Amino acid sequence: MLNSNCVFRKIRFVQNLNYCCVRCLAEDTSVDGEKRQAFRQQLKDGPKFEDFVAGKYEGKLKLEKGDQRSLRLPPWLKRDIPQGPNYHRLKQSLRSLNLHTVCEEARCPNIGECWGGGEHQTATATIMLLGDTCTRGCRFCSVKTSRSPPLPDPNEPINTAKAIAEWGLDYVVLTSVDRDDLVDGGSLHFASTVREIKRLKPSILVECLTPDFRGDLSAVETVALSGLDVYAHNVETVEDYQKHVRDRRANYWQSIGVLKHVKTLDKNIITKTSLMLGFGESDDQIKKTMSDLREAGVDCLTLGQYMQPTKRHLKVVEYVTPEKFKYWEELGNQMGFLYTASGPLVRSSYKSGEYFIKNILLNRRSSV
């Protein structure tokens, strides 16, 4: 029975009958009593709110082969709408300086927490250099693409440094779109930004999350030797899913080669990478990737849930449970990573992970 006055205004299908909500079912005396009693028992036996909070969810988490439907978002991946004074202040500051963030362009689900500052009210953001348009078209990413994006803003390095100094941050992440149209892939732009930040605020810790620069190791060196503290580059997915997920110009071993080369330049630079889960990869494929990364000397690893940004992008094949993410975190720590951040909402630029890495760097500085 569809009640036009019902405040829920959302049609549910209960026992093959149309009802707006449980209340409307309970008030409909025409429904067979036995059927109503059976439904009450179904509700009683179903998942409770505490189960959602604890991550226990009995909905469908993985698509079967050939299934064309989309999985429903499990409760542990739902986030509040971004708001608060820090969020709006940071957004206004970025727009006034013509700066972009991966938080917005890649539709990160953690933007409200990071920009809002959480309980300590310390806003953080990942600045995206070299414009907001990428020359590649990875099937998981919502950033705009073009073969010939606008030229980089020559004032971006100093504007970025000024903004970061004004925000009072002690750790900042710089990333960028892929710029295969530029001779050096934008590596000098990265390096200039790092130097400007260090000039204005020498104490700040800088992480650069870079493209692969088409495997050009001289471009990698330009960024790695710019004065940064953490060099990050994402392999994104396991080896067998690279062609399915990433642009054809990306390559698993090319990405690992970038991270490995950084360690040959300066063993004290912390290297970091990230994996998305949920494309259909197996446990053995994930374990092999983690092993390959450790052999390349990668220090820090983040693992997070892939979430389909638009209908044009790859579907989520599996929603990995919080318990399974915990397993990967424990395995990563056993394998010798300095830090393993693993969780459904963990991203390559992950706030608590940055704080952990900051402590590692500060302890190293104090022991020198």
Image: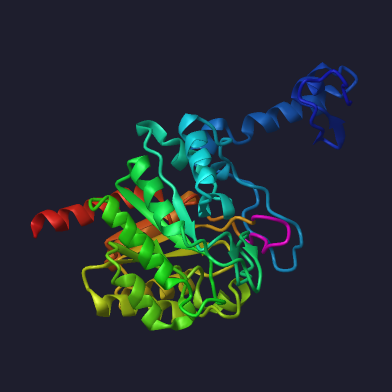
Point out the image quarter for the N terminus: top right
Q: Left of 41 or right of it: where is 264?
A: left
Task: Name the residue furthest front.
Answer: 155
Frontmost residue, 130 versus 32: 130
Main SS class of the magenta portion in the image: loop
Tell me if I can see residue 357 in this picture.
no
Q: How is the image coloured?
A: rainbow
- Residue 195: image location, x then y, percent: 31, 61
- Residue 55: image location, x then y, percent: 51, 43
| Residue at point 48%, 68% (across, down) | 283
Q: Please tell me whether residue 257 is drawn above or below residue 201 in the rendered image.
A: below
Point out the image quarter for the C terminus: bottom left
Frontmost residue, 311 versus 194: 194
Q: Quadrant of residue 327?
A: bottom left
Frontmost residue, 4 versus 352: 352
Q: Which residues are magenta?
A: 309-317
| Residue at point 43%, 52% (across, down) | 159
- Residue 244: image location, x then y, percent: 62, 75
Q: Left of 22 or right of it: where is 60?
A: left
Frontmost residue, 114 versus 161: 161
Q: Quadrant of residue 317?
A: bottom right
Q: State yes or no: residue 314 in magenta.
A: yes
Tell me if I can see residue 93 in this picture.
yes
| Residue at point 46%, 57% (across, down) | 156
- Residue 304: image location, x then y, percent: 48, 57
Q: State yes or no: residue 136 in magenta.
A: no
Q: Quadrant of residue 165?
A: top left
Q: Please tell me whether residue 178 is drawn above or below residue 240 in the rendered image.
A: above
